[in-house]
Image (tube, grey):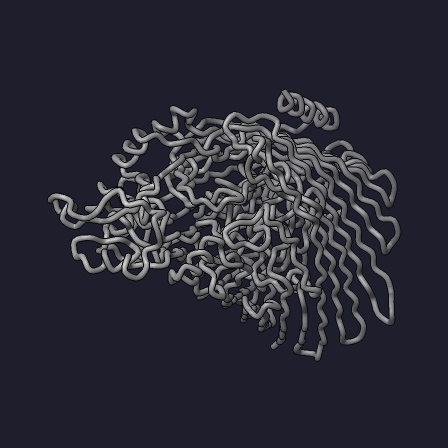
């Protein structure tokens, strides 16, 4: 109903303000010339935008200790959040970010105003907020390449298509034709780990006499961090004389919580433009990035890890080579796994028998798999833009982009292979490939009392997701399977040829976009977009916007829109298994993810995915209080129906498990529960954004103050298959309020930056208490202070800085943590402590 009403309202209001539209509009053409993202008109200030837009300069981005762009934006935009993902499978490789409390695939990312391809990783473990999301890899963009970042905090699917529900991030590349800059940064945490170094360079040069060529590169390495204590079970084993596995990233712990090791991290961009004549321009921009990310999984206890040491019912698994070869069993069976640790003579009894084998011989103290991947990202976009003799601006472009994750897992086994199992595997790869073709046109149409900006265009897009099967050892069913041993590389089973494949989705779109200053003080806009997908059908979305200049210093603005997010081919077809820990207990379970059309998923309510639909409403003001003080306040509401998400976990029967094994679903033999993607629930997200800037002369220099505040509250309005923990995460895991206050003081050759960040309380659900009631723990608020001191020596600058200079940590809470974690893994500002760094910039 809401969608019908706002579509009618938007059209009616626009028709009231537009007299007679000339018939030649049908032949008019336009280009998307994005200066402040969200409009196709000529350049205008952010304050004149009907929708809230933040513009972050390149210098603002670099003035902090983080080395990846996603963390840099988190520092500057409170409604944007990203966290380290410890022990989160593939989400460790590409961190899921969120805007306004919504998952990463509800946020559209642009590069130079063109849609950027999404990442190959589906976040099966996304901290409750991003579970099942497949968003773009923002970290692949080198920060030194950026001229600015535009953050549109408003729904824009009627203008840009799928995903633009929470808003848009537009990364604008440096287009300077001169100058070379080199930056070197090194830092580490107060605990002495996480050493990070980065070398970056940007060079601009003329491209003939009529163009520019700008190139950037970054090389960086980051050592892992660990903020862990010894697990209780590992400590007990060690006290009993068991040689417990020690994780190489920790300090003797069997399992670590922290950030992964990032190595061979290379990023490159090119941005080229050439004026072909006075009215036509050729452009090309591209990126290439690769990195290796290595993290850890949960510890496998040498007495009770199901499918490796134990059959799941406290019976120790003993492999019998004779039985595996088709003969009679001679090794012991039905041995109580709790009878005692296999050390000394107890272990020797199996070691000395060539026919019998226990995995304690290979890993006597248990093991912790190391999981990682090689991530490669590339894209290239090219086009021609210009203006016709009739005054129509145009932009015709093509774009191809790919993100690939090649997974590997070490220090683990395929239990079904018994003593012949290797300990290193390549489980396979995910590849996301996207192709875009765009024709965008804009023309100014003289009306009776104003000029109407009329835009229209066409887009064709293909999105392809591919699964490449792993090496044979990572998925094969070995001869010991019938003795109770699990199939596939433990922790991340390899993708079988039956699961591997290529799935694609094509769509085309046409759009119309009207905008004009209908009076001296009133700006109105109307956009509508029709899209046709070959998978689920058609969708039409509309957006109405208005800006009223009440006085010279006060403006009011509003937008009303509908939007959508199309399911990705990956979400519709992927199958996987992940190892998760039951909150509060540390018990490991194998969670299977099935295709929503898998027959077993269908029995639990699975069906082909349909698009999410959204209704966005925003209202705000822009107030120039004085020449030095500017304030913007924007309230918003986002209603999303039929949200796509992973269901809660369903118990798997023996018959269902056997069917999945027969279908060669990876890891099915150990699978204890299953889940699938579904259009299951509706949410309403309400919030408010406040941005205030003030500049003054102070202490012999100029000081610029910036205050940004965000409050976001999400409620789950309807759900049939979500678990209680997932609902709690959606509603309360992210802090309801965040704010930052920063001051930049320039005096002489010195620049001093101080930034204070605050996040409010949040909640974490970790099961039911003894009375069967929800057990919810409140995570206390967090804050941190960042400082930077920069001295400019002319052609080079030296910066000393610290993030979280007072070395603050989140409050310890044993109710939330388990498995050796000291701090809540979902702490909004992290749990690594202070980070100190030195940065040197050289202008050549």
Relative image position of residue 152 (x, y in whole percent): 65, 45
Q: Residue at x 63, y 72 (%)?
A: 839
Relative image position of residue 733 (x, y in whole percent): 62, 42
Q: Residue at x 39, y 48 (%)?
A: 431
Above or below, comparing residue 297 to residue 461 in the picture: below
Above or below, comparing residue 835 to residue 797 in the picture: above
Q: Nearer the viewer, residue 485 or 29?
A: 485
Q: Residue at x 55, y 65 (%)?
A: 214
Residue furthest to the top: 1
How many marks the image carries: the answer is 0
For the C terminus, which image quadrant?
Answer: bottom right
Q: Is residue 674 left or right of residue 99?
A: left
For the N terminus, which image quadrant?
Answer: top right
Q: Residue at x 29, y 44 (%)?
A: 486
Q: Is residue 90 left or right of residue 730?
A: left
Q: Is residue 236 visible?
A: yes
Q: Is residue 213 left or right of residue 423?
A: right
Residue furthest to the left: 327
Relative image position of residue 37 (x, y in whole percent): 64, 46
Q: Nearer the viewer, residue 684 or 479?
A: 479
Q: Is residue 100 visible?
A: no
């Amino acid at each position: 109903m809401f969608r019908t009403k706002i579509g009618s309202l938007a059209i009616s209001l626009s028709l009231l303000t537009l007299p007679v539209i000339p018939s030649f509009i049908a032949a008019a053409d336009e280009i998307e010339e994005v200066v402040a993202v969200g409009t196709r008109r000529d350049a205008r200030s952010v304050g004149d935008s009907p929708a809230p837009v933040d513009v972050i300069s390149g210098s603002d981005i670099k003035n902090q200790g983080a080395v990846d762009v996603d963390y840099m934006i988190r520092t500057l935009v409170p409604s944007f959040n990203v966290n380290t993902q410890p022990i989160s499978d593939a989400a460790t490789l590409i961190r899921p970010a969120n805007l306004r409390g919504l998952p990463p695939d509800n946020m559209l990312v642009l590069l130079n105003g063109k849609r950027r391809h999404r990442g190959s990783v589906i976040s099966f473990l996304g901290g409750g907020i991003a579970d099942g999301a497949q968003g773009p890899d923002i970290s692949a963009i080198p920060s030194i390449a950026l001229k600015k970042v535009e953050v549109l905090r408003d729904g824009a699917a009627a203008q840009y298509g799928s995903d633009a529900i929470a808003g848009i991030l537009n990364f604008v590349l440096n287009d300077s034709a001169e100058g070379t800059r080199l930056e070197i940064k090194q830092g580490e945490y107060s605990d002495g780990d996480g050493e990070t170094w980065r070398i970056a360079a940007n060079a601009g040069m003329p491209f003939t006499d009529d163009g520019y060529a700008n190139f950037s590169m970054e090389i960086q390495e980051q050592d892992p961090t660990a903020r862990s204590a010894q697990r209780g079970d590992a400590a007990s084993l060690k006290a009993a004389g068991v040689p417990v596995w020690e994780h190489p990233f920790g300090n003797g712990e069997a399992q670590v919580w922290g950030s992964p090791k990032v190595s061979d991290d290379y990023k490159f961009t090119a941005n080229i433009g050439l004026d072909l004549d006075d009215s036509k321009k050729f452009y090309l921009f591209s990126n290439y990035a690769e990195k290796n990310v290595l993290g850890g999984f949960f510890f496998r206890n040498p007495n009770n890890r199901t499918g490796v040491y134990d059959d799941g019912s406290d019976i120790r698994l003993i492999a019998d080579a004779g039985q595996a070869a088709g003969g009679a069993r001679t090794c012991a069976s039905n041995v109580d796994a709790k009878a005692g640790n296999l050390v000394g003579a107890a272990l020797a009894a199996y070691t000395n028998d060539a026919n019998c084998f226990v995995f304690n011989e290979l890993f006597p103290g248990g093991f912790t798999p190391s999981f990682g991947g090689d991530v490669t990202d590339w894209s290239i976009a090219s086009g021609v833009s210009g203006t016709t003799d009739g005054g129509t601006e145009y932009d015709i472009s093509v774009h191809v982009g790919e993100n690939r994750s090649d997974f590997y897992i070490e220090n683990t086994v395929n239990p079904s292979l018994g003593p012949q199992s290797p300990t290193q595997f390549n489980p396979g790869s995910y590849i996301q490939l996207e192709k875009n073709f765009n024709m965008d046109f804009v023309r100014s149409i003289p009306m009776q009392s104003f000029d109407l900006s009329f835009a229209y265009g066409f887009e064709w897009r293909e999105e392809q997701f591919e699964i490449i099967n792993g090496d044979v050892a990572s998925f094969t069913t070995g001869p010991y399977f019938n003795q109770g041993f699990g199939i596939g590389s433990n922790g991340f089973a390899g993708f079988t040829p039956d699961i591997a494949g290529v799935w694609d989705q094509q769509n085309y779109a046409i759009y119309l976009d009207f905008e004009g200053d209908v009076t001296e003080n009133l700006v109105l806009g109307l956009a509508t977009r029709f899209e046709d997908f070959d998978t689920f059908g058609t969708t039409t979305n509309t957006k109405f916007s208005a800006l009223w200049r009440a006085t010279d210093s006060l403006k009011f603005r509003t937008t009303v829109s509908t939007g959508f997010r199309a399911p990705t081919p990956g979400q519709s077809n992927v199958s996987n298994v992940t190892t998760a820990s039951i909150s509060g207990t540390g018990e490991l379970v194998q969670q299977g993810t099935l295709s929503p059309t898998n027959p077993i998923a269908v029995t639990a309510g699975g069906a082909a995915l349909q698009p999410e639909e959204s209704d966005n409403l925003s209202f705000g003001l822009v107030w120039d209080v004085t020449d030095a003080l500017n304030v913007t306040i924007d309230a918003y509401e986002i209603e999303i129906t039929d949200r796509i998400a992973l269901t809660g976990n369903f118990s798997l029967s023996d018959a269902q498990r056997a069917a999945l094994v027969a279908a060669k679903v990876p890891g099915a033999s150990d699978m204890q529960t299953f889940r699938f993607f579904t259009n299951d629930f509706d949410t309403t997200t309400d919030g408010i954004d406040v941005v205030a800037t003030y500049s003054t002369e102070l202490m012999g220099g100029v000081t610029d103050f910036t205050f940004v505040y965000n409050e976001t509250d999400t409620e789950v309005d309807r759900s049939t298959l979500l678990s209680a923990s997932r609902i709690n995460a959606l509603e309360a895991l992210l802090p309801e309020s965040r704010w930052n206050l920063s001051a930049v003081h320039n005096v002489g050759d010195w620049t001093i930056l101080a930034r204070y960040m605050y996040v409010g309380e949040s909640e974490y659900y970790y099961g039911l208490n003894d009375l069967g009631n929800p057990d919810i723990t409140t995570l206390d608020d967090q804050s941190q202070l960042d400082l930077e001191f920069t001295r400019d020596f002319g052609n080079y600058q030296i910066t000393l800085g610290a993030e979280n200079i007072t070395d603050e940590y989140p409050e310890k809470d044993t109710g939330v943590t388990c498995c050796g974690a000291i701090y809540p893994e979902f702490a909004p500002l992290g749990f690594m402590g202070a980070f100190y760094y030195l940065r040197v910039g050289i202008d050549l």
